[in-house]
């Protein structure tokens, strides 16, 4: 079922990531980590649906998306980058397989952090974020989405990794089997993995080779 929602506010959170605050339809509910299909309510764009993850929490009075804008081609995200308060989107019912199953490590690449935003916010709200770990890989430091939020979560261990910034003092990637072996001591925990398809497949394969159980790997299937 499609819902028409107006944008209440839109602002940049990094140089190429934009946060959208939206009206919330009556009775609309979702689980942290879930996504929906989104289209722009404009002629020529209503059938161009793309999946985006809710970054708001279930008890907020509004919805939120945090979306990476690709301005190098005239696609949906480029159009989204031009929207402001008062414009409207069309959203479907929620879906998704990335849901919290227990304490563990979150491994994200770039915009792959978005399913974890609501999950970690929910854990923080419940006072249960301590003991979790976030490994977050980006090309450069300026690409790190919501870095200050992660660093402010009491008890969340953060390991930021960059792959294309030699001058950075952060650890350098890639997040491969050797990196995982050197930076993770317990492979009996849950692992939440999201990012580009190739990255997810490679990390899942490496984690299983290092002893992680297949049913402990949580990712979008």
Image (cartoon, rainbow, N blue to C red):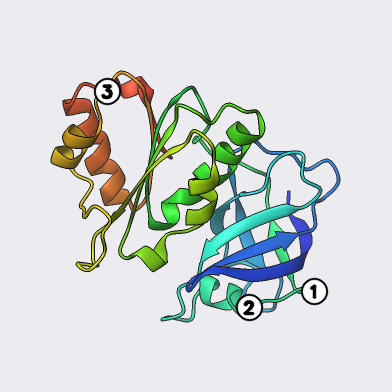
Dot 1 or dot 3: first in sequence order is 1
**Under tag 3, what secondary structure?**
loop
Q: Percent from the top left, x then y, of residue 155?
A: 49, 33
**Under tag 1, what secondary structure?**
loop
Image quadrant assignment for residue 217: top left
Dot 2 or dot 3: first in sequence order is 2
**Left or right of residue 185: residue 127:** right
Residue 217 sits above or below residue 198 on the image = above
Q: Label 2 crowding class (10 Å Cα cut-off): few <14, some 14-19, many 20+?
A: few
Q: Label 3 crowding class (10 Å Cα cut-off): few <14, some 14-19, many 20+?
A: some
**Under tag 2, what secondary structure?**
loop
Residue 46 sits above or below residue 110 on the image = below
Q: Residue at x 21, y 53 (%)?
A: 173
Q: Which mark is residue 187?
A: 3
Q: Label 1 crowding class (10 Å Cα cut-off): few <14, some 14-19, many 20+?
A: few
**Left or right of residue 29: residue 155:** left
Q: Percent from the top left, x then y, of residue 137?
A: 32, 53
Q: According to the image, label 2 marks what residue?
A: 44
Q: Residue at x 62, y 80 (%)?
A: 82
Q: According to the image, label 1 marks what residue?
A: 86
**Left or right of residue 146: residue 110:** left
Q: Is label 2 or label 3 in front?
A: 3
Measure how far apart labels 2 and 3 are at the Cα level.
48 Å
Q: Residue at x 50, y 29 (%)?
A: 130
**For this rendering, which residue is in front, 81 or 130?**
130
Measure how far apart labels 1 and 2 are at the Cα level.
19 Å
């Amino acid at each position: 079922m499609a819902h028409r929602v107006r944008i209440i506010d839109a602002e940049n959170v990094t140089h190429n990531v934009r946060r959208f605050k939206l009206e919330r339809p009556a009775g609309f509910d979702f689980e942290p980590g879930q996504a929906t299909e989104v289209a722009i309510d404009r002629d020529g764009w209503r059938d161009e649906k793309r999946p985006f993850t809710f970054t708001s929490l279930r008890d907020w009075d509004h919805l939120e998306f945090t979306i990476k804008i690709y301005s190098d081609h005239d696609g949906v995200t480029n159009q989204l980058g031009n929207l402001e308060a008062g414009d409207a989107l069309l959203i479907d019912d929620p879906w998704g397989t990335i849901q919290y199953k227990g304490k563990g490590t979150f491994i994200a690449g770039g915009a792959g952090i978005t399913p974890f935003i609501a999950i970690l916010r929910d854990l923080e709200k419940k006072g249960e974020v301590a003991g979790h770990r976030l490994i977050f890989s980006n090309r450069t430091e300026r690409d790190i989405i919501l870095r200050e939020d992660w660093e402010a979560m009491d008890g969340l261990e953060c390991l930021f990794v960059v792959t294309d910034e030699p001058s950075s003092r952060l650890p350098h990637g890639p997040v491969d089997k050797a990196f995982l072996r050197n930076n993770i001591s317990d492979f009996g925990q849950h692992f939440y993995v999201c990012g580009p398809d190739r990255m997810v497949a490679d990390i899942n394969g490496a984690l299983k080779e290092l002893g992680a159980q297949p049913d402990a790997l949580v990712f979008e299937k």
